[in-house]
Structure formats: structure tokens, C-alpha cells
Image (cartoon, rainbow, N blue to C red):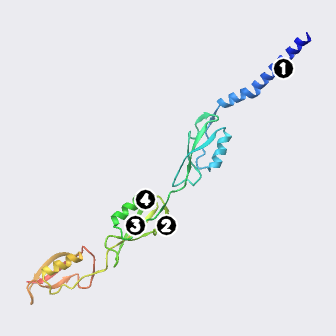
Amino acid sequence: MKRIFLYLLVILAFFIIGVLIANFLVMPLIVHKGREVVVPNVCNLSLEDAVKELKKRDLEGLVTERRHDPIIEEGYIIIHEPLPNQAVKSGRIIHLTVSLGPQVIKVPFLAGVDIEKGELILKRLGFTIEQIDYVNSGTIVRGRIIRTIPEPEVELTKGDAMKIIVSKGPVLKMPNLTGKTQHEVEVELEKLGLVLGEIKQVEGSGIKGSVIVQSPAPDEIVEPGDTVTLMVIK
């Protein structure tokens, strides 16, 4: 009889222990696992702070992507999935996208490159061309790049503004056309890139068709494409 009573006590003790384990360990785990929590906004936080903030809500942060961003500082969260303020089950993994900071690009060496090709290269690299200036140069062919501002090898970020200095060729002075025939003038002006404009015939002494007056005047600074007018002997 005593043995049976002892067995009953042991069984009762195990039952009570089982109930306690179920109530205080198993059930809380089941309930805790199934409850919903709201995803906090961890964008613009450092990775360390973001993970800590997620753990406070019983969520796990996992880095699934790292990419360049022109605004978000390196090591900080750009975006995450699920998005902020969404209700999810506790224990859910939150996928984090971390910034590598702005993409750094070195300015290429473009001296001597045609302006159109140079512009295309800079735009493909992600730079913005803020200004193009044209200056005379005795060494760089007209229409080619003399230099860039900033200079080559300087590290910039995508979207930064650039300035390009382009050659207009050497300083061009108007030649003296006095006494030359129209044919001689046409050949010389074509070499200089100047345009022959109005030719006015006037009475005068000398060889017929030869130049007696010109505009612009000799040694005057001109640009390729400028128009030259003449007065020739009738």
C-alpha cells in the first residue's frame, strides 16, 4: 500500500512539474514566437545601431546588399525589407541594404581629345559638365581639350560638376590682302578659316581686280568664321 502511495506521489510530482514547465517555459515560447511586432525605421542608422534597434523588437537584422549611395554615409542603412511600420512575426529576419558611400571616380586625362568625345566620356563617367570655355592655344589644335577643372586623377563623386577648357587654336591676325587678286584672297582666307563676304568694285589705279581696301584691317585679331569684305579696282 505504501509503495502504491509512493508511486502516486511520484506521478503527481511529475505531473505538477510538467504543468509548470508547460506554463512557464513552453507556452511563453510559443506565444512569443507567434506574436506580431512593428518593424522600426532603421534607415539612416549605422549598421550596429540598426541591429540593436531591431533586437529590441525581437527582430534579426541581416545585411543582404551593399551599394553606393550619393547621400547616405558609408556604413549606414539605405533601406530595409520589410519596410518600416509593417507588422511582422517576432523573430523575423529584416534584410538590410548598407551604403558604401558616394561612388568615387577619378577625373580622366583628356588633354588633346576632341571636345565632343571628351564630353561623352565625362557624361558616361557620371560627371556634370558645368561650363565650357574657349581660349587661344598655339599648341592644342582648335576644338580639342586643353585641360579640365578639376585636373586629371582628382577623385570626385558621381554627379560632380566639371569645367572644360577648349582650344580656339592660335591667335589669328588678319593678313594684309592689299594688292592681291580675288583668287589669291580666296585661297588665303580658306586656309585661315575666314569667310569672303561682299566685294565692292571701285575706280582706282592699279591692276584690275586687286584689293585696295579690306575689313578687318591688317593685323586685327579675328576668329575662324569671321567675314572679310573687300574693295577692289574696277
- Counting from the top left corner in percent of width and height, residue 66 is at 54, 49
Q: Name the residue under label 3.
A: 131
Disc 4 residue type (three-letter):
Leu
Q: Mark 2 points at which residue?
A: 154
Earlier in the chain: of badge 4 and badge 1, it is 1
Q: Name the residue under label 4.
A: 125
Assign a secondary structure to mark 2: loop
Look at discs 4 and 3 and give the one toward the viewer: 4
Q: In this view, does 125 lie above or below 79?
A: below
**Gap between marks 1 and 2 measured at Cα:** 79 Å
Look at discs 4 and 1 and give the one toward the viewer: 1
- Label 3, residues with CA under 10 Å away: few <14, some 14-19, many ≥20: few
**Gap between marks 3 and 2 measured at Cα:** 18 Å
Look at discs 3 and 2 and give the one toward the viewer: 2
**Gap between marks 4 and 1 measured at Cα:** 76 Å
Could you say which disc has been placed on residue 13 in the image? 1
Earlier in the chain: of badge 3 and badge 1, it is 1
Q: Which of the 4 quarters of the picture holds residue 41? A: top right
Which quarter of the rendered picture does the C terminus lie within? bottom left
Q: Is residue 210 left or right of residue 91?
A: left
Disc 2 residue type (three-letter):
Val
